Image (cartoon, coloured by chain):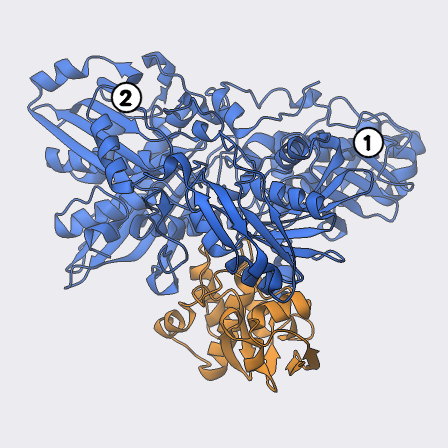
Amino acid sequence: MSRLEKLSRREFLQKTGVASGGLVFAMTLGTPRGALGADAGSVAPNVYVNVRDDDVVEIYCHRSEMGQGIRTSLLQVIADELEADWDRVELLQALGDPKYGDQNTDGSTSIRKQFDVLRTAGASAREMLIAAAAMEWGVPASELVARNHAVHHEASGRSAAYGDLVASAAELEVPEEVTFKDPADYRYIGKSMDLIDGFEMTTGTAMYGTDTVLPGMLYASIERCPVFGGTAKSVDDAKALKVQGVKQVVRMPEVTSPPAYNPLGGVAVLASNSWSAEQGRKALEIEWDTGLNAEYDSESYRKQLVETSHKDGKTALNRGDVNAAFEKASRVVEADYYAPHLAHAPMEPPAAAANMHEDGSVEIWAATQDPQSVQGTVANLLGIDKSQVKVNVTLLGGAFGRKSKADFSAEAAWLAKQTGKPVKVSWSREDDIRHSYYHSVSAQYLKGALDDEGNAIAWLHRTVFPPIGSTFSAEATGPDSGELGLGMVDNPFAIPNMRLESGDAKAHVRIGWLRSVCNIYHAFAICSFADELAHEAGADPRDYLLRLAGPSREVDPADDGAKYPNYGQSLDVHPIDTGRFKAVVEKVSAMAGWGRDLPKGHGLGIAVHRSFLSTVGTVAEVRVDDKGKLHVEELWLVIDAGLVVNPDRVIAQMEGAGIFGMSLALHGEITAKDGMIEQGNYDSYPVIRMGETPKAINVHIMEVDAPPGGVGEPGVPPVAPAIVNAYFAATGKRVRELPLKKAGVV
Amino acid sequence: MAIEFTLNGKAQSLDVDPDMPLLWAIRDIAGLTGTKYGCGKALCGSCTVHVDGNPMRSCSVSVSAAAGKSVTTIEGLSPDGNHPVQKAWRELNVPQCGYCQSGQIMSAVALLERNPKPSDQEIADAMSGNICRCGTYTRIRKAIHRAAGGES
């Protein structure tokens, strides 16, 4: 029996070689016996499937839907192996519960890590229903086939609908081994099924975290210290309590060190509606002790990061001797790249509701990526057991990593306990932008050497950023191997001398994951520098990328002394395959018409990057107008994600990644002054709108016979460097800092 | 004093602070949660509703300004959810997270009512007040063309 994986993101990033293949035929999913249906008249072979005797199959989605389409894709996989009829399946959102295994919906893991789990869930139900028919009819199971929601006996022509087999199936043991369908027989996997939530999402009936309404519920708005880590010295709530509709003012628990997922302190105003809560909050008079981070200043911090990146760092990977190569090189190139903090800014700011029950348990409704983390965080905060924390997962109005943190659910739970009433906490946009778990600011130093023929013979890369670990440990001051494995030590280039180093930086805000994480700045630096070397070598950037990738082979960073987690999966199953890398280079450049004549002021740029076990290549065509302003005219994205479950959702993720990548390339920047975040809303933290959208975002999915890679994140990293490289092609000017608006070209 | 207006064809009488933004009156008082908060400052368009047929950012219009007027939200756009714009949205599987789509659809409907065959540029002009952080813009553009009866 293989237990389902239940690892936090930190754990999985630290773990290596968690095999996903080969075990599935002996995988038991939760419930050991078949008879335990959700109610009488049903049979539940495992925690994900419940077959009802009215012929409806209930399927539980234990992953969070935040726009990646997992509710549709998960249903496709289970229903396909189950041979269920699409019109007779009902999708239910699972509660947070360890029985489902890993529910933490981040790291682009739902399909790449759980494809076999989901297939097993469907297959075990199918085989039980076949066994039930075999028992009823007295024929060997081997003579039976399951097809389209029924079991058929070809020899006798008998068939039985799944619902009619429930009673017999309930008498049977769940099979310990299952056989998967032949992929040639897939009816849903690999098909672009329509969105399961499409009707609700277009009629205003889809329910998100902020849409929860409970009887007698109070609406909470929380004023938090403008500097991370600060505390309220004094609070005068007299005026707030006089605001019409305000019921109560509650001090939040003080921020902890490290902050983890605990509430961030501050003062909550609770009212009968959102508006009253907001007005009451404005009437609070609070004197803050701004604490240890009041000096945080992005300009001076930047100098520190860049200085650190110019000094020897901790070695993450070493191949050959870069210093010797630099000495004998015919040309040496150096470059500093810089990328700022980012905020996720999902359209739905963080929101959760909570209600305490009389038995001391608490029920939560949250737009959360990680309901089990909510259970743990709330249990700790309230001093109760995790099993007493019931977490209902709503739809997420965007997340991008922000909602993998349980802090806002913990706030709601805390307030429900303090007030004895149901409470909904909804963050304002300003709360969201000013108190995020920010994507890390980063300095990258690159030094490369070319020989007489323009071949790259040495590559030195130093990465410096405050680590995510600082959110969970006060001692964490430098990148860990998990973060360095996000697009740095997995460098695929065939350069004989390579040295990769990291430098420390202390965090002054909460640092967290943002869609594709460290891959953003690593890809920005690496793909930009590859373009710079091409220019230095007098070569075409696309051709030079193929030269850098070198012969087709599988790269193992451990060969050069690196710790490389490979996103928690085996390198044997998910190799760093330079042949596949080059195929993406060739495909995306061909699609974009690389080398064609371009109108005046236009340029094409290319960037290819592997992350989350998938490789994405991007070509950007930019136009630079006579005022020197850049416009992204068109994007091409090619993804090699191995097997894909729903091609249309993969295309949608690439389209979205193109826009998300453009937002961070052109506009995205969070800065601090006097410890306070300077941005607050979409005016000061702009994102791409329709007016800046390219005329087309063209997507191609490589057909590769390989296990599934990630999809939600890998599209983002190559977008910014492709745009920067295109800008260079159009103008001859190199921009080494994001966002591009800093250079005045947007 | 109660504020009276028509909401999705039905008379409403809400006894609320007249300064309360229409958004919160619709969501918290009238109980229709299809209209979304995104920014509170008319920057993102998630809260777009029609007031006497005109698209308005309900986060930045007081409920008293709607007195005597007819307000339509996403829930009132069509009786069965099959407005041509809603259908086009589904045919092209536009939504990702879906949160902004109420506002996107309300803005698109308003655009098509005054300009039945908008060009890409006219779509960009009309829709740039609506942010989609998931980045569904290219599909929104196609869906508007499709709802307008054009090919997409």
Tell me what residue is drawn at x 43 percent, y 24 percent. Answer: A482
Mark with earlier residue (1, 2): 1
From the viewer's perspective, tell me whether residue A712 is left or right of residue A273.
left
Q: Amino acid at mark 1?
A: Met
Between A742 and A326, which is closer to the camera in this rendering?
A742
Q: Which residue is mark 1?
A: A128
Residue A633 screen position, x and y as percent:
29, 58
- Chain letter of the residue carrying label 2: A
Residue A288 screen position, x and y as percent:
45, 45
From the viewer's perspective, tell me whether residue A450 is left or right of residue A670.
left
- Observer able to see residue A36: yes
Q: Which residue is mark 2?
A: A500
Between B129 and A241, which is closer to the camera in this rendering?
A241
Query: According to the rendering, which colour does chain A have?
Result: blue
Helix, strand or loop for disc 2: strand
Tell me what residue is drawn at x 54 percent, y 83 percent. Answer: B53
CB atoms of marks 1 and 2 within 8 Å: no
Q: Distance between the Cα atoms at labels 1 and 2?
A: 53 Å
Q: Amino acid at mark 2?
A: Leu
Q: Is residue A544 above or below residue B112?
A: above
Residue A317 screen position, x and y as percent:
31, 17
Q: In the picture, which quadrant includes the N terminus of chain A? A: top right
Q: In which quadrant of the rendered view does residue A737 lie?
A: top left
Residue A500 screen position, x and y as percent:
28, 21
State which chain is coloured orange: B
Give the label on residue A269, or none: none
Q: Is residue A571 above or below residue B102?
A: above
Helix, strand or loop for disc 1: helix
Q: Is residue B44 above or below residue A444?
A: below
